[in-house]
Image (tube, rainbow, N blue to C red):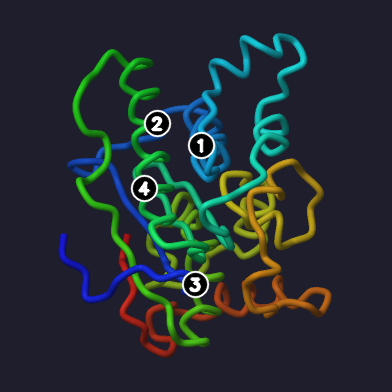
Amino acid sequence: MNRPFNFAPGEYYHIYNRGVDKREVFLDSLDYDRFILGLVNANNKEVFYIRDVKKKLGSKYKGLETCLDLCDDTLVDIGVWCLMPNHFHLLVKEKEEGGLVKFLHKLETGYTMYFNKKNERSGSLFEATFKAEHVSQDNHLKYLYSYIHLNPVKLIQLDWKEKGIKNLKKTLSFMSNFYRSSYLDYLGIDRIEKGIINPKVFPEYFLEEGSFEGEILEWLKYSDLDDRPRLNLSKN
């Protein structure tokens, strides 16, 4: 895939990819947890294999917490992430030349190997080349915090963007229990997954208490997300 730009250190990118033929790539909680581990394991210059770490540490192995302890030299900084049944979204900042591509290759290859072995299948799991947008405008970057984090709302109301939220209380409750994204981290929830993101290297849009919640609520109350200031974003 020829992109109209080259990845460069210090720049922000919206990364997303989905399963081949739009198939689901996460079938159960084990799959989600394994990919979340990959967000850490693949984002490390030094290669370490989870199976080897498990074997070495035995009962002392603590999953994501252990991987976060081992990962001290990252390829990219992750600002936002979200996993959906058939695709994923990431907002990242490249740290060094080639780091982003290396990270995505390790992430998708490692997860595909896990998924294929678990489900006794072979072949590609994700579309051949991950999609990427260079985020160079401030309003675009801020918008992605809402756009990515609100993807899961489609799981309980597919037409919410077109018809508006039918039950705001139910939606907010669902989002506050959705652990498969960085949403809870921006709510200030203390959890292990918070170590995946490095918001300090991204613009500090939500310094004031409640500002992130307020931004999300504003989008949810708007009747049509796509009628907001237009940005040519994916409709995954």
Q: Which residue is mark 3?
A: 144
Residue 214 lies, in percent from the top left, at 70, 77
Q: CA distance from mark 2 to mark 1?
A: 7 Å
Identity of the residue furthest to the bottom in this view:
229
Rounded to the nearest angstrom, the CA distance separating label 1 from label 4 is 15 Å
Mark 2 Cα shell of 10 Å, populated few (<14), some (14-19), many (≥20): some
Residue beneath the point at 65% across and 70% down: 201
Q: Residue at x 51, y 52 (%)?
A: 75
The residue where tag 4 is placed is: 87
The total of numbered circles placed on residues is 4
Answer with the quarter of the image where residue 197 lies: bottom right
Q: Dot 3: few (<14), some (14–19), or many (≥20) neighbours within 10 Å?
A: some
Which of the two labelled residues, at mark 3 and mark 2, occupies the earlier sequence position? 2
Label whose residue precedes the other's in the sequence (4 or 3): 4
Which image quadrant is residue 53 in? top right
- Which mark, residue 38? 1
Q: Nearer the viewer, mark 2 or mark 4?
A: 2
Q: Residue at x 70, y 73 (%)?
A: 212
User: SS class of the residue under badge 2?
Assistant: helix
Residue 64 in percent (x, y) is at 66, 33
Mark with earlier residue (1, 4) = 1
Residue kind at label 3, given as amino acid type: Leu
Q: Residue at x 31, y 68 (%)?
A: 234
Q: Please tell me the numbered disc located at residue 173.
A: none
**Along the horizontal axis of the image, is 94 left or right of 174?**
left
Which corner quadrant holds the N terminus?
bottom left
Q: Is residue 43 above or below residue 201?
A: above
Residue behind mark 2: 110
Disc on the earlier residue, 2 or 4: 4
Are dots 2 and 1 in contact, CB under 8 Å?
A: yes
